[in-house]
C-alpha cells in the first residue's frame, strides 16, 4: 500500500528498501513472506520493513519511457513474484501498462511503500561497524539494521564529454528526455550509441528527419536467437565475475551483442542502419567528423545508457579505485548490512526478481545470526 511521505523526525525500520521498481518490489514481497511487517503500520515491531520510492506513483522508471515503446517492442517484462501479468494489447504503451501492473501488485501484496521520498544518503549511525545505518531522505531519517538498494539507473544518465559541447546551438538530449520522433520532424539529428535504445530511436526518427548514427566501436550483431539456457547463463556468469572483482559493469548489450530485433531489421531494410565513427568534437553548427569535415545538425540524441544511481551510498566509502563495488551475490562484500539488487547481473526483470528474493533471504539470515 502506498503512503504519502510526511516530513518527520527519525523513524525506525529493521530493513529499508530503496526503490520500488521490479527489484525493490520483489525484495519487499519476499521480506513480507519471511515475516517482516510494515514499519508504517507497526513502527515498534521487532522485524519491520519500509520501501522508499522517489516516484509519486507506481511504475518506477517505466513511467518515463517514450510513448512509442510498446509492450510489443520492449525486451519482455518478467512476472513479479506471486502475481502473473494480465493480458495486454501488444500496442499498449509500456509506460502505461507496466506501471498499471506494478500498481495492482503493490495493492494486492499490501507493500509498505512511502512515496514520494528521495534518499539523500546512507551512512553509519555511529562508529560501531555492526551498528545501525541512517537513511537520510527528503521526508526525514530512518534508522535501520539493513538496506536493500534497488534504486536502478534511470536518474544517472551516461553523458559523454566532448570538446565544444556547450557551444552547440541545437538541442542536446538523452534517452531519458526522449518523447517521440515527431518533435524532430524535418531536422538533422545525430543518434549516438550502440545499444537497443539507440537503434529504436534511429529507426523512428529517421522516418521524419535526416539521421546520422554514431558509435565508438563497430556494433556486433548476434546471429540467431538469444538462448537463455546457454547464452544467457554465460552472460550472467561474465557480469557476476565482473562485480565480484569490483569492476564497473557495462550495458547489457556490451555482454550480449545486438540481436536483429524488429527495429534493427526495419532500419537495415530502409538503409538507415549506417554506422559512423564518433565525431571528435562539437561546434556551434554541428559536429566535426574524424576526417575533419563538419556535419551540420539540429539535435544530438545521446542514447549512451545509464550508470547505477548509487551516489547516496557514497558516505559508506564502498567504491574502489575503478569506481566499482565488490559484491558476493547481492551482498556488498565489505558491508553485510547492504545488498544491491537490480545491479550488475540482476539488471534484467527476471534477474531483479531473483535478486530481490536472495537479498531478502540473506539479509534476514544475517540479522537473525543464522548465516548468509
Image (tube, rainbow, N blue to C red):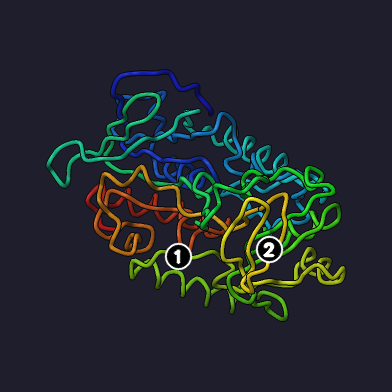
Q: Is residue 166 left or right of residue 207?
A: left
Q: Residues within 10 Å of mark 2 (few under 14, many from 20)?
A: some
Residue at the extreme left: 127
Q: Is residue 311 left or right of residue 124?
A: right
- Asked if 294 appears above or below 290 in the picture, the reply is above
Of residues 199 and 290, which is closer to you in this image? 290
Dot 2 corresponds to which residue?
A: 294
- Give percent across and percent down for residue 119: 39, 35
Name the secondary structure under disc 1.
Answer: loop
Say which residue appears at 27% left-offset and 35% top-offset. 134
Say which residue appears at 64% left-offset and 41% top-offset. 64
Which image quadrant is residue 214 in?
A: bottom right
Name the secondary structure under disc 2.
Answer: strand
Of residues 22 and 29, which is closer to you in this image? 22
- Give percent across and percent down for residue 245: 33, 70
- Give percent across and percent down for residue 277: 63, 72
Which image quadrant is residue 279 in?
A: bottom right
Residue 303, disc: none
Say which residue appears at 33% left-offset and 57% top-offset. 331
**What is the count of numbered marks?**
2
Of residues 372 and 323, which is closer to you in this image? 323
Q: Residues within 10 Å of mark 1 (few under 14, many from 20)?
A: many
Q: From the image, which quarter does the C terminus lie in?
A: bottom left
Question: Could you tell me how far apart the alpha carbons at marks 1 and 2 are, in whole angstroms?
Answer: 34 Å
Dot 1 corresponds to which residue?
A: 249
Amino acid at each position: 500500500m502506498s503512503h504519502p511521505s510526511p516530513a518527520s523526525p527519525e523513524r525506525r525500520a529493521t530493513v529499508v528498501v530503496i526503490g520500488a521498481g521490479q527489484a525493490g518490489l520483489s525484495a519487499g514481497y519476499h521480506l513480507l513472506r519471511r515475516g517482516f511487517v510494515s514499519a508504517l503500520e507497526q513502527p515498534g515491531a521487532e522485524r519491520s520493513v519500509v520501501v522508499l520510492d522517489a516516484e509519486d506513483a507506481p511504475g518506477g522508471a517505466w513511467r518515463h519511457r517514450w510513448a512509442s515503446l510498446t509492450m510489443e517492442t520492449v525486451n519482455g517484462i518478467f512476472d513479479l513474484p506471486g502475481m502473473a501479468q494480465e493480458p495486454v494489447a501488444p500496442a499498449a504503451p509500456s509506460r502505461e501498462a507496466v506501471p498499471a501492473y506494478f500498481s495492482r501488485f503493490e495493492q494486492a501484496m499490501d507493500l509498505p511503500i512511502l512515496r514520494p521520498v528521495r534518499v539523500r544518503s546512507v551512512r553509519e549511525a555511529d562508529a560501531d561497524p555492526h551498528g545501525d545505518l541512517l537513511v537520510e531522505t527528503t521526508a526525514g531519517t530512518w534508522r535501520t539494521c539493513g538496506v536493500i538498494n534497488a534504486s536502478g539507473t534511470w536518474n544517472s544518465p551516461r553523458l559523454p564529454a566532448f570538446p565544444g559541447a556547450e557551444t552547440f546551438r541545437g538541442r542536446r538530449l538523452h534517452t531519458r528526455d526522449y518523447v517521440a520522433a515527431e518533435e524532430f520532424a524535418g531536422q538533422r539529428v545525430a543518434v549516438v550509441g550502440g545499444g537497443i535504445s539507440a537503434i529504436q530511436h534511429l529507426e523512428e526518427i529517421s522516418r521524419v528527419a535526416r539521421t546520422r548514427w554514431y558509435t565508438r566501436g563497430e556494433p556486433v550483431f548476434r546471429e540467431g536467437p538469444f538462448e537463455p539456457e546457454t547464452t544467457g547463463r554465460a552472460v550472467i556468469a561474465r557480469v557476476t565475475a565482473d562485480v565480484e572483482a569490483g569492476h564497473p559493469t557495462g550495458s547489457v548489450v556490451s555482454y550480449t551483442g545486438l540481436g536483429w530485433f524488429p527495429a534493427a531489421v526495419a532500419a537495415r531494410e530502409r538503409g538507415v542502419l549506417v554506422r559512423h565513427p564518433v565525431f571528435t568534437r562539437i561546434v556551434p553548427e554541428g559536429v566535426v567528423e574524424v576526417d575533419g569535415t563538419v556535419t551540420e545538425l539540429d539535435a544530438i540524441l545521446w542514447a549512451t545508457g545509464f550508470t547505477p544511481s548509487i551516489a547516496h551510498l557514497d558516505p559508506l566509502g564502498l567504491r574502489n579505485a575503478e569506481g566499482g563495488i565488490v559484491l558476493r551475490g547481492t551482498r556488498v562484500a565489505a558491508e553485510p548490512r547492504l545488498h544491491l539488487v537490480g545491479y550488475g547481473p540482476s539488471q534484467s526483470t527476471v534477474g531483479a526478481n531473483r535478486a530481490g528474493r536472495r537479498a531478502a533471504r540473506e539479509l534476514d539470515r544475517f540479522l537473525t545470526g543464522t548465516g548468509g
